[in-house]
Image: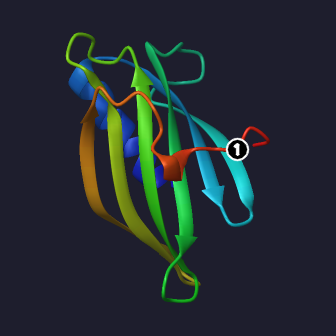
Amino acid sequence: MNEIVLPMLCELGNETSQQIGAEVVFMHPGGINRLDVRTSGPSVHPDVEGEIRIVMRDAFHQDSFKFALQSIMHGIAQGTGFSGFSARGNVRFSHESIALKLTGRSNLYNVWAWPEKFEMNDAD
């Protein structure tokens, strides 16, 4: 998923002239995994930190899944109300490669709470 998340963060960082760090939370049938992603090197402290939640579910084909993601970024592009972005798409695995297809993306403004499908249980 780095192939989708990191380019989005880098584009956003270039547009706002800010270094961005985010915790990426993968929610899938097998559990939850977390990964930290930065648009800068590990020694540079990000100007903005946020969270990206990705919900993955099985698709119609074997070895593929659909995903939906949403981010909340506090302090980015201050004064604009920009709060993050959402996206959806699918991933298909083969023996030789991974094919990623982004099927939609939207910028979000003044959305500071997670929609129900992106909420996590307190136990998570």
Could you say where residue 54 lies in the image, as x and y percent from the top left? 52, 52
Question: At 37% across and 65% down in the image, what residue appears?
Answer: 89
Question: Is residue 54 at all visible to an observer of this figure?
Answer: yes
Res 93 quadrant in image = bottom right
Q: Is residue 47 left or right of residue 101?
A: right
Could you say where residue 107 lies in the image, as x and y percent from the top left? 25, 39
Residue at the bottom extreme of this rendering: 61
Q: Quadrant of the C terminus?
A: top right
Could you say where residue 96 lies in the image, as x and y percent from the top left? 54, 81
**At label 1, which amino acid type do we have?**
Asn
Question: Is residue 99 at all visible to an observer of this figure?
Answer: no
Q: Give the structural element (helix, strand or loop) at label 1.
A: loop
Q: Nearer the viewer, residue 33 or 115?
A: 115
Question: At 67% across and 43% down in the image, what residue appears?
Answer: 34
Disc 1: CA contacts within 10 A as few (<14), some (14-19) or many (>=20): few
Q: Is residue 117 left or right of residue 71?
A: right
Residue at the spot of label 1 = 121
Res 72 quadrant in image = top left
Q: How many marks?
A: 1
Q: Nearer the viewer, residue 92 or 44?
A: 92
Res 15 quadrant in image = top left
Vertical comparison of 83 with 52: above or below: above
Question: At 36% across and 44% down in the image, what residue appears?
Answer: 7
Q: Nearer the viewer, residue 78 or 19?
A: 78
Could you say where residue 122 lies in the image, as x and y percent from the top left? 74, 38
Residue at the front extreme of this rendering: 116
